Image: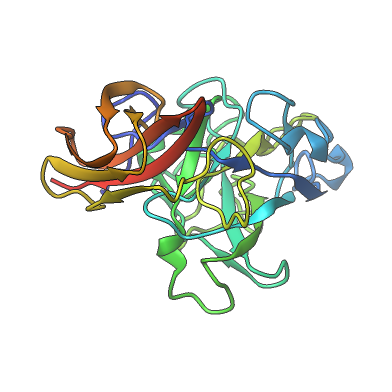
Amino acid sequence: MAQFAPAAGKPGSTAIRHDSSCFIGWATGCEVVRGYRDISLPDSGIADAGTPQSTLGPAIQNGILSLGDGGIATLTFDAPITNGPGWDFAVFENSFLDTFLELAFVEVSSDGKRFVRFPAVSLSNTVKQTGAFDYTYPEKIHNLAGKYRLGFGTPFDLNELKDSANIDVTRITHIRIIDVVGSIQNPFARKDSKGNTINDPWPTRFSSGGFDLDAVGVIHAKLSTPKNNHTTKPSIKIGPNPIHNKQINVYSEEHTTATLYSLSGAKIVSWTIQKGQNSLEIDQHTGMYCLVFDIQGKTFTHIIEIIR
């Protein structure tokens, strides 16, 4: 049975820290349709923890929005998200453990009307219902929000949807987060892209039941003008990207510094960059990294991919 990326902090994890320099923006609008605390008991009431405003801005700052069983949150942004190299955005939940995971489907749209879902996969055992406080393992989960604990985003790559109809992956205006319910009972069970039933903690008859949306961070966006200190500066050119050996070339129109970070925010190495052409040696494992330039007190981020 296939295994996917492990928990935050473990080798091979794709989790991105909330304070990673790869984020250039965050959701600025949210509409929500809440679900029941227990979809099998309509008189259980509607989940009501948090507000739509809780999802706006950076993660771990404004609380969370609980969706309830099958609840839906639709996020909007100051600038459209675009398909860049590697991950393009990340969704944050508030799990307190690596193995207490409440999951959600992720869909994107270029017009707010027609949405396309990321092909999610759940390989969790479905013989027994996962109880309200039982374990779900991130190694069994792919393309479902909520894969990682509080403070670590689950990343998504729009390139996976580049051949989909009805969307433009270079101009995503809406992201929709849909709680998976988690029940293995028909008719409440939800299926992944392979037809597998998705088993996660259920029932959760609390005001904070269902997926707890913290934030959505943007990595690549169409910015007509710089929105903050984390935009790509035209005077800096890098290549090749992806990197297949240990060398990357950097052309800069001014003296600066460059620092390589993992997507989890760990600093790896720094260089002094001279005006003109520079050659940097990057001896790291296959994966995505942030190459951050510091110019006159402002930071400019490039996402690079290393393939060995």
Q: Residue at x 69, y 23 (%)?
A: 61
In the image, residue 208 sits, relative to residue 211, either above or below, namely above
Q: Which of 126 and 223 is in front in this view?
A: 223
Where residue 57 sits, quadrant-wise, is top right
Q: Number of numbered discs present?
A: 0
Q: Which residue is drawn at 56% across and 35% down?
A: 229
Q: Is residue 7 visible?
A: yes
Where does the image place residue 101, in percent across and percent down from the top left?
Answer: 53, 33
Where residue 187 sits, quadrant-wise, is bottom right
Horizontal arrangement in the rendering, residue 208 relative to residue 223 (left or right): right
Q: Nearer the viewer, residue 54 or 201?
A: 54
In the image, residue 11 sits, relative to residue 108, either above or below, namely above
Q: Residue at x 70, y 70 (%)?
A: 111
Horizontal arrangement in the rendering, residue 53 relative to residue 85 (left or right): right
Q: Look at the image and tell me in which quarter the C terminus lies.
A: top left
Which residue sits furthest bottom? 165
Q: Residue at x 26, y 25 (%)?
A: 271
Where does the image place residue 145, in percent across and percent down from the top left?
Answer: 54, 44
Where does the image place residue 155, in percent across and percent down from the top left?
Answer: 46, 44
In the image, residue 284 sits, relative to residue 77, either above or below, namely above
Q: How was this image coloured?
A: rainbow
Q: Is residue 47 visible?
A: no
Where residue 162 sits, quadrant-wise, is bottom left
Q: Nearer the viewer, residue 303 or 226?
A: 226
Q: Nearer the viewer, residue 174 or 25?
A: 25
